[in-house]
Image (cartoon, helix red, strand yellow):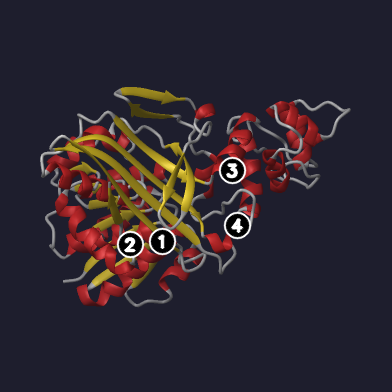
């Protein structure tokens, strides 16, 4: 009997997911429907595969979307996070299991009881970070708990970076996933547990005073706290922990440069500019209250309380925010929109360039009165811009879970969930090793 999988979204992170499903389609008698508003993006992913069907729709079109959900045995959403709720409501109505890669929104969380009562699995946070981090963290935590040890500290770091051989700009960064998410990173602030006390960090301080870690085979990287870590303490089942943080990895210079971008209010999504006849330099002058008499570089340095020859000023200069280059003409644009246009050009990966995904967990625990530190690390490079490490580590966990459920290899857990249960993470992590996604552990 043929089973139908609906994949909503054909963007950057879907190539390995779709390839995996299509490569297994004949064996398992699957029909793969790829729904997206971009016909070319779908075509690039399915390449006339006989097991695939293109559905060029506006995902916000209730009738078209619901018709596709009705046909599906499994729904996978890789749409922008705010659109998952549309598919979630359809899946609940028509009793379909759902997998998404994004954080659980308040709207989807509110559906948990109804989803459980309907006997459905809404597996959220099933990509890289969140996703692979939850699975590997839970595996570590459960193994430590089995020997009756007490976990005192848990820190988890993950970052999508540019591979060293293609790292050729002063920011040490290029886009390998949703560019808009980079511009808005940290806007909700962050919270984590330190020495038994909750620490809340506002947006303007998220990228300040970043500490560093060493990753085997990669070197030294800086990190900043990622969103609200606190609610994962219960999810991970370690209420006794005294230090708990989920963090994002970047190079130290990136964090310093991005702090300057925030201090200049260039990520503002609420302000508005008429871009006609304007340049990046005139935008910055208007944003920062520039007055004649000094150079724009000197003015920016004064605003940031830096020397004009500081590395951060040179990074901003390289980015092009001080150039008399015309802005893209739009009726109205926010600073975040203008900045994104610039970053899309400056941080673009070329077709043959590679990205790199790095993840590391650091766990301290007490076993038989002895303090032990466990470090679990993974780094993987992409093949090129399209077959990126980011797409691989986001897409494959989702695809494998879909296969396991559709082939009755696992009994899908019920409710709105994250992948922290052994029945889910064990077979997925085992299969991921075959694709080069594996962790090495050190114990001290």
Q: Which mark is residue 253?
A: 3
Q: Circle 3 — which element?
A: helix
Dot 4 or dot 1: first in sequence order is 4
180 vs 88, nearest the viewer: 180
Q: Residue at x 56, y 54 (%)?
A: 174
**Disc 3: CA contacts within 10 A as few (<14), some (14-19) or many (>=20):** some
Q: Residue at x 63, y 34 (%)?
A: 260
Label 3 – label 2 distance at C-alpha: 28 Å
Dot 4 or dot 3: first in sequence order is 3
In this picture, residue 227 sits left or right of residue 289? left
Residue 107 in picture, x, y percent from top left: 32, 35
**Disc 4: CA contacts within 10 A as few (<14), some (14-19) or many (>=20):** some
Residue to which mark 2 is pinned = 437
Q: Circle 2 — which element?
A: loop
Dot 3 or dot 2: first in sequence order is 3
Foreground mark, 4 or 2, reads 2
Label 3 – label 1 distance at C-alpha: 22 Å
**Disc 1: CA contacts within 10 A as few (<14), some (14-19) or many (>=20):** many
Q: Circle 4 — which element?
A: loop
Dot 4 or dot 2: first in sequence order is 4
Residue to which mark 1 is pinned = 380
Residue 375 in picture, x, y percent from top left: 31, 48
Foreground mark, 4 or 1, reads 1
Label 4 – label 3 distance at C-alpha: 18 Å
Q: Which mark is residue 175?
A: none
Relative to residue 138, is residue 260 depicted above or below?
Answer: above
Kindly indicate whether the residue at mark 1 contacts the one at mark 2 (C-beta within 8 angstroms).
Answer: yes
- Outermost residue to the top: 197
Kindly indicate whether the residue at mark 3 contacts the one at mark 4 (C-beta within 8 angstroms).
Answer: no
Residue to which mark 4 is pinned = 348
Label 2 – label 1 distance at C-alpha: 7 Å
Kindly indicate whether the residue at mark 1 contacts the one at mark 3 (C-beta within 8 angstroms).
Answer: no
């Amino acid at each position: 009997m043929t089973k139908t999988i609906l994949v909503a979204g054909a963007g950057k992170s879907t190539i390995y997911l779709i390839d995996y499903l299509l490569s297994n389609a004949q064996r398992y008698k699957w029909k793969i429907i790829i729904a997206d508003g971009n016909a070319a993006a779908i075509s690039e992913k399915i390449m006339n595969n006989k097991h695939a069907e293109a559905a060029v729709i506006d995902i916000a079109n209730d009738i078209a979307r619901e018709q596709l959900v009705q046909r599906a045995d499994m729904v996978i959403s890789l749409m922008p996070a705010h659109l998952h709720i549309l598919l979630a409501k359809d899946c609940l109505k028509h009793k379909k299991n759902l997998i998404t890669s994004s954080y659980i929104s308040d709207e989807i969380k509110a559906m948990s009881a109804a989803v459980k009562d309907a006997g459905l699995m809404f597996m959220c946070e099933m990509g890289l970070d969140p996703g692979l981090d939850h699975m590997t963290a839970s595996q570590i935590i459960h193994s430590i708990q089995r020997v009756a040890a007490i976990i005192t500290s848990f820190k988890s770091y993950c970052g999508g970076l540019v591979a060293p051989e293609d790292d050729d700009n002063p920011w040490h960064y290029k886009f390998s996933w949703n560019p808009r998410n980079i511009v808005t990173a940290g806007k909700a602030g962050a919270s984590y547990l330190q020495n038994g006390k909750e620490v809340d960090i506002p947006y303007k301080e998220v990228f300040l005073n970043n500490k560093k870690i060493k990753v085997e085979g990669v070197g030294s990287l800086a990190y900043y706290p990622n969103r609200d870590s606190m609610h994962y303490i219960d999810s991970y089942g370690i209420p006794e922990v005294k230090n708990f943080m989920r963090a994002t990895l970047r190079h130290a210079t990136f964090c310093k440069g991005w702090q300057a971008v925030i201090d200049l209010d260039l990520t503002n999504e609420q302000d508005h500019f008429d871009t006609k006849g304007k340049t990046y330099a005139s935008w910055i002058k208007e944003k920062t209250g520039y007055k004649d008499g000094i150079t724009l570089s000197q003015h920016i340095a004064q605003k940031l309380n830096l020397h004009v020859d500081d590395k951060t000023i040179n990074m901003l200069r390289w980015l092009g925010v001080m150039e008399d280059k015309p802005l893209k003409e739009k009726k109205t644009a926010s600073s975040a929109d203008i900045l994104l246009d610039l970053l899309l050009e400056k941080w673009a990966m070329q077709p043959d360039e590679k990205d790199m995904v790095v993840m590391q967990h650091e766990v301290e625990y007490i076993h038989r009165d002895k303090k032990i530190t466990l470090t679990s690390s993974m780094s993987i490079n992409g093949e090129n811009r399209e077959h990126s490490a980011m797409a691989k580590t986001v897409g494959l966990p989702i695809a494998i879970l879909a296969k396991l459920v559709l082939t009755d290899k696992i009994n899908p857990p019920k409710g709105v969930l994250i992948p922290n249960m052994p029945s889910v993470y064990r077979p997925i992590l085992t299969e991921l090793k075959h694709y080069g996604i594996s962790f090495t552990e050190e114990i001290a």
